[in-house]
Amino acid sequence: MHDGDVKRGASLAPGLRAATLVLAAAVALSFAPWAAAQQPQGTRTFTLYLQQAFPKQTNTNQQIDLINQTFGTNFDTWDDIANVSLGAKLFWRVSPRWLVGLEADLGAGGITGTAETDTIAGPANVSFSQTYAIYADLMLATHYLPCRSCTKLEPFVLGGIGIGYEQDTTRLTLANSFVYQRLFVRNDGWFPVATLGIGLYAHVFRDPSWHLEGGVAYYWARLDHMVNAEGALAPSRQVRADSDTTGPNYWIGFGKSF
């Protein structure tokens, strides 16, 4: 029943391989003799940003659609809501064209709904929720700055690999004066993550140490295992919790070099 905690079904392997190659290139090429960048070598850059993600959530949305068909409800799927998280980056400029550092993301939220349906015991209330107490990741990441002469606008290529953690709960209840049935599934665990994308530093302030940052990327992450399920609506004592948070995203942030 629990194929459906945030579903974005793509394999991690291609993303992890590609991101690993990007990081390997950062180490191998970080001291190449390219033209000097706008910030001196050794400069640190800190950025706070908001990120909007677009998870595929294929199995999750199919599960919610099945609930809607079974009970005649119209609960939202993950395609119907905003998936917004808060992130932070801390980078060091290790060469004129390369920044290497850490990137972290933190999110929480979920979908909920209630409706009325007809049963053989009369009208009953149907309640559904799938909520994330926490979704977090930490990545070793790099920015490659390809433009030698850019000043106000600096494009970059992003790559990162790391680890994520999530804790989520799925609940489904059917209740009236004569009937009370439920499904309860709690899922949590650690999983690998990776990302590749492109972005832009915009030095639009009077003080050039401050900047705006934005970009788009693709993100790979998946937690897929068996977990315990409780209640009469559970199809079995253990169900598959396939939390596949793979998908595209974009972000915008505000930061400072020091």
Image (cartoon, rainbow, N blue to C red):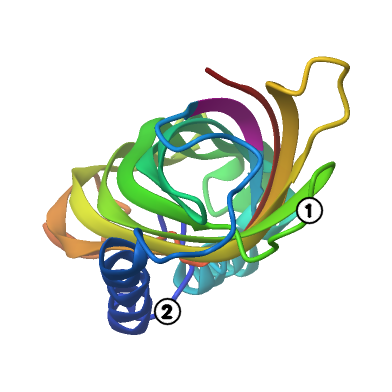
Q: Quadrant of residue 221?
A: bottom left
Q: Decide: is 208 above or below 84.
A: above
Left or right: where 17 falls relative to 151: left
Along the viewing direction, whichever of 61 and 247 lies nearer the viewer: 247
Please name which of the two marks, 1 or 2, marks the residue nearer to the observer. 1
Left or right: where 258 falls relative to 192: right
Q: Which mark is residue 10?
A: 2
- On the image, the x and y values in percent for residue 231 come to 24, 44
User: Label 1 to label 2, Cα distance in Å?
Assistant: 35 Å
Q: Residues within 10 Å of mark 1 (few under 14, many from 20)?
A: few
| Highlighted magenta segment, given as a residue range | 45-50
* Callout 1 touching callout 2 (CB < 8 Å): no
Q: Decide: is 232 above or below 3.
A: above
For badge 1, the amino acid type reads Cys
Q: Is residue 258 magenta?
A: no
For badge 2, the amino acid type reads Ala
- On the image, the x and y values in percent for residue 91 come to 42, 36
Left or right: where 215 falls relative to 99: right
Give the residue number, with chain letter if any, for mark 1: 150
